[in-house]
Image (spheres, grey):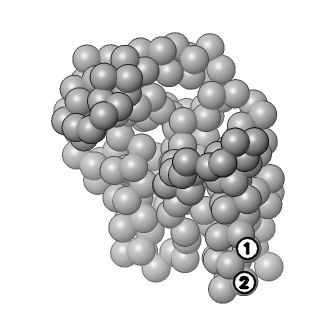
Amino acid sequence: MERKSLLIITGSMGAGKSSVLGEASDILTLQNIPHAAIDLDAFGLAYLPPGASNDAAMYRNLQSVCKNYASLGVRRFLVARAIEDRATLEHCSKAVSAKNTVVCRLSASIATMRQRVKMRESGAFQGQFVARVKKLNSILDRARLEDFTVATEHRSLSQIAREMLLKAGWIFT
């Protein structure tokens, strides 16, 4: 039985994590490579009662979903999430039960990421999200958890996703 592999797509807000996740899934599908593509932020999108932790619920949700996929034979997991520290990286890897974890950081200029977030987020928290771009990017710079980086500016989603999958060793052409 093939061991479980985890490819984490990290980066600041607006770097392109969700978009690249979707395109990478499409590329893997076209190559008939079974996988699950998970935008981890969606698993923690809740307002919970006092004392409950969104992150704890998010990782329990990830663990449950990965067990379900694994029971169907899925051994490759793509997860999009800004990974700010080693403990978060370990939570992800443990929740997936991955034997092999690779982290790809997506990068773009602060101005580009802010513009992307401003276009994407039109609601009540837009200003906070735009302001968080630079701060989160600095946190990721200090953490240095990525195995490699892929630039996302002035390139097609297919080029970006293909480069990421090649560098991760998930595809070979």
Which residue type carries mark 1? Lys
Q: Say what amino acid the circle numbered 2 marks.
A: Ser
Q: Name the residue: 73% across, 59% down.
A: 60
Quadrant where the C terminus is found in the figure? bottom left
Number of numbered discs overlaid on the protein picture: 2
Q: Residues within 10 Å of mark 2 (few under 14, many from 20)?
A: few
Left or right, residue 111 beside residue 13: left
Name the residue carrying label 1. Answer: 67
Q: Secondary structure at mark 2?
A: helix
Quadrant where the N terminus sits is bottom right
In this orientation, which residue lies closer to the viewer: 115 or 37?
A: 115
Task: Categorize mark 1 by other alpha carbons within 10 Å: few (<14), some (14-19), many (20+).
Answer: some
Mark linked to residue 14:
none
Please tell me which residue is depicted at 70% across the width and 42% down the height of the picture: 50
Residue 109 in sight: no
- Distance from disc 1 to disc 2, alpha carbons, whole Å, reads 6 Å
